[in-house]
Amino acid sequence: MTLMSSKKVSWRAIDIVTAAVLGVALGFVFFAWNLIYQPITAPLEAVVPGLGALLYGVWLLAATMAAAIIRKPGAALFAELVAASVSALLGASWGILTLESALVQGLGAEIVLLVFAYRIFRPWAIVLAGAGAGLAMGINDIFIWYPGAKPEFIAIYVGSALISGAVIAGLGGWRLAKAIAQTGVLSRFQIGQEAAKPV
């Protein structure tokens, strides 16, 4: 495998600004989700404990959307940390653990993208990055919030988090990024140039 060119790896000023703006915007989304996720996921939890994690992919959107748009090493981690910082500053009840979770989740997405040497950013790659973030989230949550949990709960929770990461954050994040690109505001990014091409 050849090394990535410095042009592919180095960040432009617009990359930093866009990832930061995306992170801040999604930080508000994260905080809003913090306030409403429990009543929304309660019916799933009532059916099968741990199944509520099927909707936790909302907290991973910064990582997948940044990866789809910026397409540089560290974009997923950076945006996820910015979003978590905003959520924490707004009063997220988990305090510093909000940032710890973001670090783990962002790294989960980055590891998947690293496997592809940051060369492939097709929808399926973003879905896999979302799954990686979801898997990381699920495992981290088990250690932090559910120590001593039974194996069946662990399997359901981590599996649900992985699926949510793939569907909500991966597929959903890709579609949101494409929708933004189609407005023309991302014309300086590859995703924006792809959206501008005639079908």
Image (cartoon, rainbow, N blue to C red):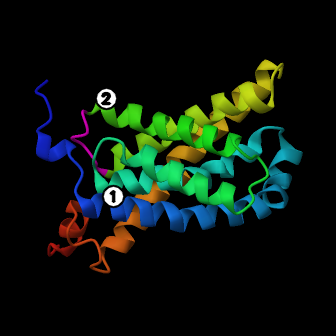
Q: Residue at 34% across / 43% down in the picture?
A: 125
Which quadrant does the C terminus fall into? Answer: bottom left
* Region in magenta: 117-122
Marker count (numbered): 2
Query: Quick one: SS at disc 2?
Result: helix
Image height of 199 relative to 96, above or below: below
| Residue 162 is one of the magenta-drawn residues | no
Image height of 47 relative to 25, above or below: above
Kindly report the distance in space between the C-alpha atoms of the residues bearing marks 2 and 1.
23 Å
- Whole-percent x, y for residue 48 in the image: 83, 40
Image height of 58 relative to 100, above or below: below
The picture quadrant where one finds residue 152 is top right
Q: Report the amino acid beneath label 1.
A: Ile
Q: Residues within 10 Å of mark 2 (few under 14, many from 20)?
A: few
Determine which residue is flagged by label 2: 115
User: Residue 54: which numbered mark, if any?
Assistant: none
Q: Is most of the magenta stretch helix, strand or loop?
A: loop
Of 166 and 101, the residue lying toward us: 101
- Whole-percent x, y for residue 4 in the image: 15, 35
| Mark found first going from the N terminus, 2 or 1 | 1
User: Residue 16: which numbered mark, if any?
Assistant: 1
| Residue 119 is one of the magenta-drawn residues | yes
120 sits to left or right of 16: left
- Whole-percent x, y for residue 20 in the image: 43, 61
- Whole-percent x, y for residue 101 in the image: 62, 39
